[in-house]
Amino acid sequence: MVYVLGINPNHNCTACLLKDGKVLACASEERFSGIKNHLGFPLRATEWVLKFAGITPEELDLVVDSFTTPMRNFWTTAQMREYFVKKGGLGVEAWLQRYRAMGYKPATAGLKAITLLSRHFFYSRKKHDREISQVLKVPVEKVRGVDHHVAHAYATFFGFAASKAPECLVMTYDGGGDETCGGVFLAKKESLRKLVSVPNSCSLASLYADVTLHLGMKMIEHEYKVMGLAPYADLVGAEKVYREVFDGLFRVDLVFGPASVRGGR
């Protein structure tokens, strides 16, 4: 028997336990904490899936998280609130995110510099894996990270297509993960080959997040409200709002991504 614990350590963090490739249990941390879109390591969700299966952490063969980029494992409630309200950042990062959304290219360069410094000096992959190892009490050698979109593609292929189409194309698209927001893969039997990657600067979801923030709502949470209400607008009203509010508000740069043009360039 092979037990693999898969974790998503980002927003709406979740734990999923597999036995010999079959899903035994899956749970999101928000169900236990009561905090919608809970950020970080899904500790209580992990404890629950292990208890459901009747095994201990020592029996796990692998712990795999859905990013190769090290993600912050533990957040306070206040930090989570700031992250969503200030568009995915804390402190200086939040300040840079705000100016990036206003179209200041130096802010984008600053965010990239912070990411590189954090990844290699302040919060490395090794430190990230050690934290998980210490919390779960499993050897650090059992903790692995997999490319975010490869994880999406494998989940899609084995979850829906492998038994029906042993060879097919798989397309992924999301807000962003491991420097890309999408990809096209060729899946064949148990192998996966990446054909195309879409950089984060082309993320449509980032544009949705900016629009959601401009409307005074929370990113990565209230976009569904914007999409859900959109079909109820009549054509005349939609054109009026577009002309008076959104026309010229955003531009898309293939290097720096979507940004507001209000408040500077």
Image (spheres, grey):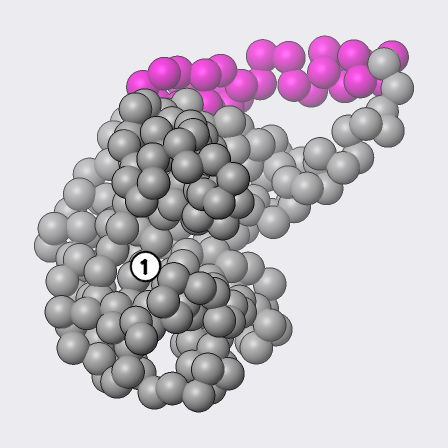
Q: Residue at x 72, y 42 (%)?
A: 225
Which type of secondary structure does the marked residue at label 1 adopt?
A: strand
Vertical order, 101 against 63 (above or below):
above
Point out the image quarter for the N terminus.
bottom left
The answer to whether residue 64 of the structure is visible from this angle is yes
Vertical order, 135 against 102 (above or below):
below
Between 165 and 193, the residue placed more toward the observer is 165
Q: Residue at x 55, y 36 (%)?
A: 209
Residue 48 belongs to magenta span: no
User: Going by the image, does 249 lie left or right of 103?
Assistant: right
Q: State the image coordinates of residue 141 (x, y, percent, origin top left).
A: 13, 69
The answer to whether residue 181 of the structure is visible from this angle is no
Q: Amino acid at mark 1?
A: Asp
Residue 262 belongs to magenta span: yes
Q: Which picture quadrant has residue 177?
A: top left
Point out the image quarter for the C terminus.
top left
Q: Which residue was labeled with disc 1?
A: 65
Q: State the image coordinates of residue 154 (x, y, percent, origin top left).
A: 38, 45
Q: Residue at x 27, y 32 (%)?
A: 193
Q: Which picture quadrant has residue 182?
A: top left
What's the magenta region? 236-265
